[in-house]
Image (spheres, coloured by chain):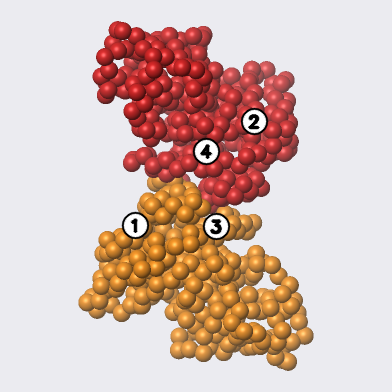
Chain colours: A red, B orange
Amino acid sequence: MDKIKIFSPATVANVSCAFDVLGFALSNVGDEMTFRKIPEKGLKIKMKDNMHLPNDPRKNVAGVVGLAMLKQVMPDFGVEMEITKGIKPGSGIGSSAASAAGAAFGMNKLLGDIFDLKTLVEFSMVGESLASGVRHADNVAPAVYGGFTLIRSLNPLDIVQIPSPSNLFVSIVHPLIEVRTRNARKLLKHSVNLRDAVVQWGNIAGLISGLFMEDYALIGRSLKDIIVEPVRSILIPLFDELKDASVGAGALGSGISGSGPSVFALSEGHENAIAVADAMRAVYQNSGIDFDVYVSGVNKNGIEIINS
Amino acid sequence: MDKIKIFSPATVANVSCAFDVLGFALSNVGDEMTFRKIPEKGLKIKMKDNMHLPNDPRKNVAGVVGLAMLKQVMPDFGVEMEITKGIKPGSGIGSSAASAAGAAFGMNKLLGDIFDLKTLVEFSMVGESLASGVRHADNVAPAVYGGFTLIRSLNPLDIVQIPSPSNLFVSIVHPLIEVRTRNARKLLKHSVNLRDAVVQWGNIAGLISGLFMEDYALIGRSLKDIIVEPVRSILIPLFDELKDASVGAGALGSGISGSGPSVFALSEGHENAIAVADAMRAVYQNSGIDFDVYVSGVNKNGIEIINS
């Protein structure tokens, strides 16, 4: 294979109660990336958008992933990567993860499909480290595997694919302010009350059970984060109003997507998710805040090949 | 119905990583309880063993449950409860819970089967409060429902039944020293490191996933408790040796049962569970510590009627 074009999905990490251990992929929001073999060894990057991301592979999240793979495999060719970002950086829906995971996936195809999915996640985390200073997998794993993925353990990496109920949809509002993951992490307290931790892991266990049982009401009851959300939500304008509006419009529950500022809400059914998105839009409509709104199903396949 | 005889099972709460939110019931260890209508109103208790438990209903865990139910229903008859303990108090395998849950179940039958299972759990917790000073459901809920039960939330009570893999067995060793739940709770730290909490809820999510997927290896990888076990295990003689011996004999994983001192290990297959029990027995054999050993399947039905 000399050329491949792929779609790498946006992702929602943390999923309210499951800070740092769970994420899921979207079906219709993501980056497009094209990979071409070139005679000159090494890696070239072309950014096909106006998002001011660096072309220097050593400073680009997709670039460092590609360089790490080239360093390990040492092929007798080089690669040109063309990236059309569909996800704005700093949005909280896995912009860096989509590019990093897409890079790992596409490079692997040109290199002869020699790595398994878990290894692609390992490579992708090189990009996440560059983006946020923290090696984490809760965006790149769902981007690579699709659906909901649990990162049971990071060292050693242990990824568990969790089924996604067929009628589960997500509504997302992205206020166009930038919250860097690096800064959002600084807000976190180093210790938590044991009683709160118990409440949180009861909810995580409930959320996982709800996903397995396709029990939408249980998913809704479990979508509560009493540890991270109270601290991080202060960075998100009108957060409480967005939550109230989404639940008022019938959402199962809502929370911060990743480290924000995007806010996600889960719903049973596509129509309900559209109504929830409309309710979230109405909160920002006259606030003077610019924003994007998305409604998506859960992506079951992860990164997809557009053509090759 | 004028008389009923029941079996109320022993239970393993906490299940390693799932402190305060998960428990499961045993199939062959428990209390036998007989309930008879009597003309004189009120409650009488007969203890049919030598475990020095009080006959006064106001001081007996089964008694306070019965009294609470009589107070609410106000029937025109009284009840005599005869209890043959199969579970030693202070063992950590839900001795008080078996009596409390059995009382709720048996009383309900004599009162005309008017309460649902969740309400029986609520009544049972009156007994748990008397026993340990803390209203908790992670023993009484699996005793009432059977199998694995998640207590997603205590207020309001939200119980989720989790499937049990068909070939999952438990080995338990009970060193005959007494650890009161009340004292074991005092050892707990009030706050935990956020990093540790994240590791713990990754494991809980992995355990729940493993139970749903019948993935024994995942269950094993998830059976790790880095928060409560390091603190409480100091009360259990030769705890590390028991863990090493059980895993060495093929157990999926092991941990403290409830607040101890019993130690449980989960295995795939009955024969494996017997080998694990033998390995645990060998640790205590020449130690001078008296102990009991149990091997059991997971009880799928909860409290069972022996005759009526």
The span from disc 2 to disc 1 (Cα, nearest Å) is: 42 Å
On the same chain, marks 4 and 3? The answer is no
Mark 2 belongs to which subunit? Answer: A
Q: Position of residue B294 (x, y in %)?
A: 39, 74
Looking at marks 3 and 1 on the same chain, the residue that comes earlier in the sequence is marked by 3
The front one of A137 and B299 is B299
What residue is rendered at 30% in x and 72% in y? B278
Q: Nearer the viewer, mark 2 or mark 4?
A: 4
Mark 1 belongs to which subunit? Answer: B
Left or right of residue B246, residue B202 in this image:
right
Q: Which residue is mark 4?
A: A148
The span from disc 1 to disc 4 (Cα, nearest Å) is: 32 Å
The front one of B142 and B163 is B163
Mark 3 belongs to which subunit? Answer: B
Using the image, tell me which numbered label, if any, was put on residue B230. Answer: 1
Q: Which residue is mark 3?
A: B162
Q: Secondary structure at mark 1?
A: helix
The span from disc 2 to disc 4 (Cα, nearest Å) is: 16 Å
Of the 4 image quadrants, the one containing the N terminus of chain A is top left
Q: Secondary structure at mark 3?
A: strand
- Residue lying at the far bottom of the rendered structure: B39
Q: Amino acid at mark 3?
A: Ile
Q: Is residue A283 above or below residue B198?
A: above
Q: Nearer the viewer, mark 3 or mark 1?
A: 3
On the same chain, marks 1 and 4? The answer is no
Using the image, tell me which numbered label, if any, was put on residue A171. Answer: 2
The span from disc 3 to disc 2 (Cα, nearest Å) is: 29 Å
The image quadrant that residue B142 belongs to is: bottom right
